[in-house]
Amino acid sequence: MTKNQIAYDILSLFYKGETTDDTNLVLPQIKYWIDITRSKLIRNSINKGQSINPDIIQTIECLNVEIVDASECNCEKSGCVIQRTSLKLPTTIETNQSNLLLNVSTSLIPGKPFTIIPFSRAPYIKAGKFTNKGNIAFLHNKYLYILSDVLFDKISVSAVFQNPEDLKYFKSCSSKNCYSEDSEYPMSNHMIDDLKKMVFDTNYRIYFNSQEDDINDSAGK
């Protein structure tokens, strides 16, 4: 299902299948609630030790990479190159253990994903260890940094992002948008019904019960 389909299903529950003049005003708010509730459900699931469903993962392909000054990430290392994505990445969902940045890869080294570490460990990585440990990646100020003795042109990043729609600003290797209104909403099927119920019972009911009908709208409530 797309986010639009989920949002209209929630509207349909409240208005019992009827369309009103309020629909266009309420829809953006419902979409915001959908993203917030999705993050909450995924975070709770991972914190309980459940596995990460592939349906919730999104990939940004062909991210440009550039060489930067090592002082940007406090990674003064001799014998290695500090590289960074040219664009900031969308915010990833954070769990009790880590953020859900799952995979960094490049076509230059197929089948060998990068080792992802927290930023706090980056200054302590010893130069000359990349051959054994592989290439190392970490997030800092929303950029993805790479410690490596290899120069990369482009990389791909897979993660569970907080707002799936943020990927509409990124292009795939074939120059298509990484996300659009027609994209499947990145959520496992068994969670969608729970999400609709939570948005409808919590956010939507509270929102409408708190509104005073001081205009002559079509709902007449």
Image (spheres, grey):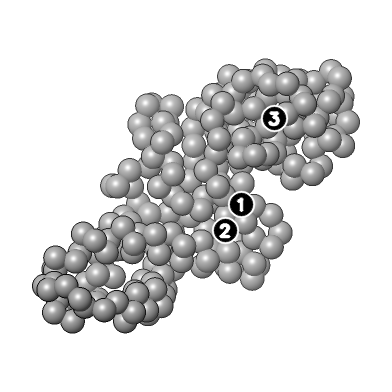
Which residue is located at x 44 percent, y 44 percent? 166
Give whichever of 53, 139 is nearer the camera: 139
Which of discs 2 and 3 lies nearer the camera? The answer is 3
2 or 3: tag closer to the N-terminus: 2
**32 up-or-down from 80: above or below:** below
1 or 3: tag closer to the N-terminus: 1
Give whichever of 184, 39 is nearer the camera: 39
Does residue 203 appear left or right of residue 64 in this picture? left
In the rendered image, the quadrant that contains the C terminus is bottom left
**Which residue is denoted by mark 3 in the rendering?**
146
Which of discs 1 and 2 lies nearer the camera? The answer is 1
**Cβ–Cβ below 8 Å for labels 1 and 2?**
yes
Gap between marks 1 and 2 measured at Cα = 9 Å
**Mark 1 packing: few (<14 Cα in 10 Å), some, or many (20+)?**
many
Q: How far across and how far down the image is residue 58, in percent?
A: 48, 46
Q: How far across and how far down the image is residue 188, in percent?
A: 44, 61
Give whichever of 32, 17 is nearer the camera: 32
Residue extending furthest toward the front = 214
In the rendered image, the quadrant that contains the N terminus is bottom left
**Which residue is denoted by mark 1 in the rendering?**
100
**Mark 3 packing: few (<14 Cα in 10 Å), some, or many (20+)?**
many
Mark number displayed over residue 52: 2
Gap between marks 2 and 3 measured at Cα = 24 Å
